[in-house]
């Protein structure tokens, strides 16, 4: 017999979305009064599926929208069509999206077209520059125009929404769900300090460790190379420090990092790690060098300083 409870559809397609929506989905499934389901858009399938397992998330729907060589317009078109079908099938009372990805933007627009209200987690982050980050700044502004409930992580984000004309009654300051996710995972790490992935055992030592990541599109035109040269300079100046760089699967990122950093003995270019291993590396690191919005938020949970390799950041 079909449930008569109102339905909530949570949509994610990238690793950061799943991490930040995991506490929401977990609590939503445990609560009474509604029926919650989740949809994995498949935007970053290879990176996302291990994270879903680590976070104990089992979305009811998984889409296959990615194609080799596909641009943002093609991805958006595929997402809109596929998510429209999911929304039509589920008939949710609310659609919940997170952040600023193409998945979040497409899900919000598909819901809006079907007159389904949208709740936007991590609403109100702004740089004011549509080119940085690209396309994320435009995505989150577009979501804000169609969302009915804006869940802002900070009072500053809430103020940004009010300046854009969003009614105060539609904004709730919730804090950042990445804190809940990081602490949940920390509590599940081995208590003896061992890494959750055997490949990281070599970094259990007295040597200091710096965690490095980089992946943003706006860094492709020279920015990524500049960061890699900077890391190479630091590594040369500090041979007693291990620089650990989980390399993103994007070929442009992988090619640049391997070309510029592949010969440094104390720079370790490793495959992307699972979320448990990422939390272990953050906790193990002296500090973090990153362009990742998520890492900018996760590192302070463990009181680690962050060097942000971006022209502008929307995080406080």
Image: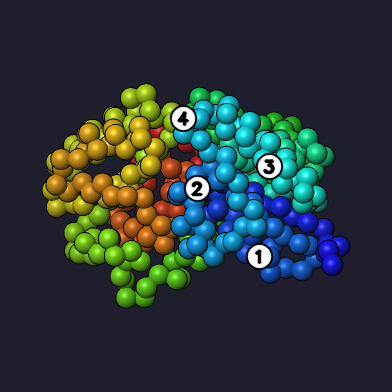
Q: Position of residue 230 (x, y in %)?
A: 24, 35
| Mark pair 4, 1: CA separation | 37 Å
- Residue lying at 27% horizontally and 37% vertically, measured from the top left: 257
- Residue lying at 57% horizontally and 44% vertically, measured from the top left: 64
Query: In the depicted view, which residue is nearer to us: 51 or 125?
Result: 51
Q: Quadrant of residue 221?
A: top left
Q: Secondary structure at mark 4?
A: loop
Q: Earlier in the sequence, mark 3 or mark 4?
A: 4
The numbered disc on residue 189 is none
Residue for badge 1? 27
Query: Vertically, is 267 above or below 182?
Result: above
Q: Nearer the viewer, mark 3 or mark 4?
A: 4
The numbered disc on residue 45 is 2
Q: Secondary structure at mark 1?
A: helix
Q: Nearer the viewer, mark 3 or mark 1?
A: 3
Query: Vertically, is 13 above or below 275?
Result: above
- Residue lying at 29% horizontally and 30% vertically, measured from the top left: 225
Q: Position of residue 253 (x, y in %)?
A: 34, 35
Residue for badge 4? 69
| Mark pair 3, 1: CA separation | 23 Å
Relative placement, left or right, of 73 versus 244 is: right
Q: Earlier in the sequence, mark 2 or mark 1?
A: 1
Residue for badge 3? 83
Query: In the depicted view, which residue is nearer to us: 286 or 6?
Result: 6
| Mark pair 4, 2: CA separation | 15 Å
Relative placement, left or right, of 181 versus 6 is: left
Quick check: marks 2 and 3 in contact, CB under 8 Å?
no
- Residue lying at 21% horizontally and 38% vertically, measured from the top left: 261
| Mark pair 2, 1: CA separation | 24 Å
């Amino acid at each position: 017999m079909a449930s008569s409870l109102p339905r909530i559809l949570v949509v994610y397609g990238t690793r950061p979305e799943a991490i930040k929506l995991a506490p929401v989905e977990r609590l939503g499934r445990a609560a009474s009064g509604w029926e919650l389901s989740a949809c994995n858009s498949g935007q970053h399938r290879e990176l996302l599926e291990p994270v879903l397992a680590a976070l104990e998330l089992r979305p009811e729907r998984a889409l296959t929208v990615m194609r080799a060589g596909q641009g943002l317009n093609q991805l958006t078109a595929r997402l809109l069509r596929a998510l429209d079908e999911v929304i039509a099938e589920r008939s949710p009372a609310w659609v919940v999206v997170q952040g600023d990805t193409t998945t979040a933007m497409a899900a919000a627009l598909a819901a809006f077209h079907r007159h389904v209200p949208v709740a936007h987690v991590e609403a109100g982050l702004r740089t004011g520059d549509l080119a940085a980050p690209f396309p994320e700044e435009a995505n989150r502004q577009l979501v804000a125009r169609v969302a009915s409930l804006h869940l802002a992580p900070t009072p500053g984000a809430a103020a940004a929404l009010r300046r854009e004309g969003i009614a105060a009654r539609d904004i709730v300051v919730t804090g950042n769900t990445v804190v809940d996710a990081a602490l949940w995972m920390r509590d599940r790490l081995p208590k003896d300090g061992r890494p959750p992935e055997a490949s990281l055992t070599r970094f259990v030592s007295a040597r200091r460790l710096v965690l490095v990541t980089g992946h943003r599109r706006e860094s492709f035109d020279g920015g990524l190379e500049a960061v890699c040269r900077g890391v190479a300079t630091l590594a040369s100046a500090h041979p007693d420090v291990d620089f650990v760089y989980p390399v993103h699967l994007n070929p442009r990122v992988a090619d640049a990092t391997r070309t510029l950093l592949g010969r440094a003995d104390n720079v370790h270019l490793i495959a992307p790690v699972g979320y448990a291993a990422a939390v272990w590396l953050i906790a193990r690191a002296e500090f973090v060098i990153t362009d990742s919005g998520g890492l900018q938020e996760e590192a302070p949970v463990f009181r680690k300083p962050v060097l942000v390799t971006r022209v502008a950041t929307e995080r406080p």
